[in-house]
Image (tube, rainbow, N blue to C red):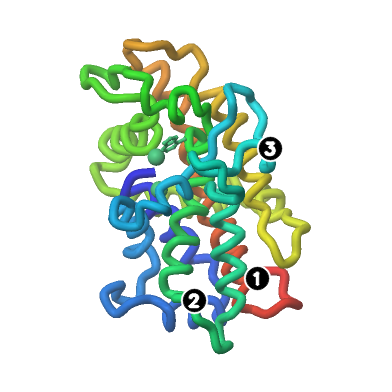
Amino acid sequence: WGKEGHIMVCKIAEKYLSEKASAAVQALLPESAGGELSTMCPWADQVRWHYHWASPLHYANTPEVCNFKYSRDCHNSRGEKGMCVVGAINNYTEQLYNYGKKTSYNLTESLMFLAHFVGDVHQPLHVGFAEDEGGNTIVVHWYRRKTNLHHVWDVSIIDTAIKDFYNKSMDTMVEALKMNLTGGWSDDITHWENCKNKRSTCANDYAIESIHYSCNYAYKDVEQDITLGDDYFFTRYPVVEKRLAQAGIRLALILNRIFDGDEADG
Ligand code: ADE
Ligand code: ZN
Ligand code: ZN
């Protein structure tokens, strides 16, 4: 996601944090965050070129197949295992279990990376095809503007929705998503939260969902130089909304499990 997508995911997560998790997050956040996790959620993109080893941790790609297999797909360009978005979520979660203990990890950075990557694994094209770099090499027109398919899903669909549906206000869009979570989606939340892995996360499942959405929605009926407009927007926008909401709910679930202790289930 772009900056707005990450902020929205974390604004939703903040609402679903337990008291203990919220206190731990407050304690870990840098002063500059003003006590809000959401302000730090785009951070991992801002340091992407400085922490260039972390660049492959934003995504995972498959060899043009519509399924995700950790052993096959979770690696960087040098073939190092675990160097993808799924491995990163599990790794930073594991680091954060050291909260309150003596540790050499910088848990402030662990938290900021984790919050960002849980957002990214829900962006369908962050689990796309290696061949086209998750849509980055597919040139499209978004209405009249030239861009690429990856950027359409990171930014353009969200921007168009904010402009056309929400009076140009991201906060209004977040409120609408929160309303859906207490209304139409309230019965879905327990399914979204269903994660049997106690100590690890279900990031692998979220990546599998993403590659399915990539095949069935993002890549579907798209080719080089195509123009995408209303038809594409109105059929794909519901997927974007749902993925942002799921990411927020699941980030809260992961943080609640970490900071509420091993007994709690979020
Ligand atoms: N670079 C290469 N593949 C990518 C992907 N799926 N998402 C974001 N950046 C990428
Ligand atoms: Zn992206
Ligand atoms: Zn990212």
Query: What element does badge 1 sit on?
Result: helix
The residues bearing labels 2 and 1 have C-alpha atoms spaced at a distance of 19 Å
Label 1 within 8 A of ligand 3 by Cβ: no
Tell me which label, 2 or 1, sits earlier in the chain. 2
Above or below, 37 relative to 240: below
91 left or right of 187 in image: left
Q: Is residue 32 visible?
A: yes
Above or below, 191 relative to 160: below
Residue located farthest toward the front when viewing the structure as drawn: 78
| Residue 261 location (% of width, % of height) | 68, 80
Label 1: which residue? 257
Label 3 within 8 A of ligand 1 by Cβ: no
Q: Which mark is residue 69?
A: 3
Residue at x 30%, y 40% (from the top left corner) = 162
Above or below, 255 relative to 139: below
Q: Nearer the viewer, residue 258 or 237?
A: 258
Q: Which mark is residue 105?
A: 2
| Residue 143 location (% of width, % of height) | 27, 19
Label 3 neighbour load within 10 Å: few <14, some 14-19, many 20+:
few
Q: Nearer the viewer, residue 217 or 19?
A: 217
Label 2 neighbour load within 10 Å: few <14, some 14-19, many 20+:
few
Residue at x 59%, y 32% (from the top left corner) = 211
Q: Quadrant of residue 47?
A: bottom left
Q: Quadrant of ligand 2?
A: top left
The residues bearing labels 2 and 3 have C-alpha atoms spaced at a distance of 29 Å
Query: What element does badge 3 sit on?
Result: loop
Tell me which label, 2 or 3, sits earlier in the chain. 3
Q: Amino acid at mark 1?
A: Arg
Residue at x 47%, y 68% (from the top left corner) = 110
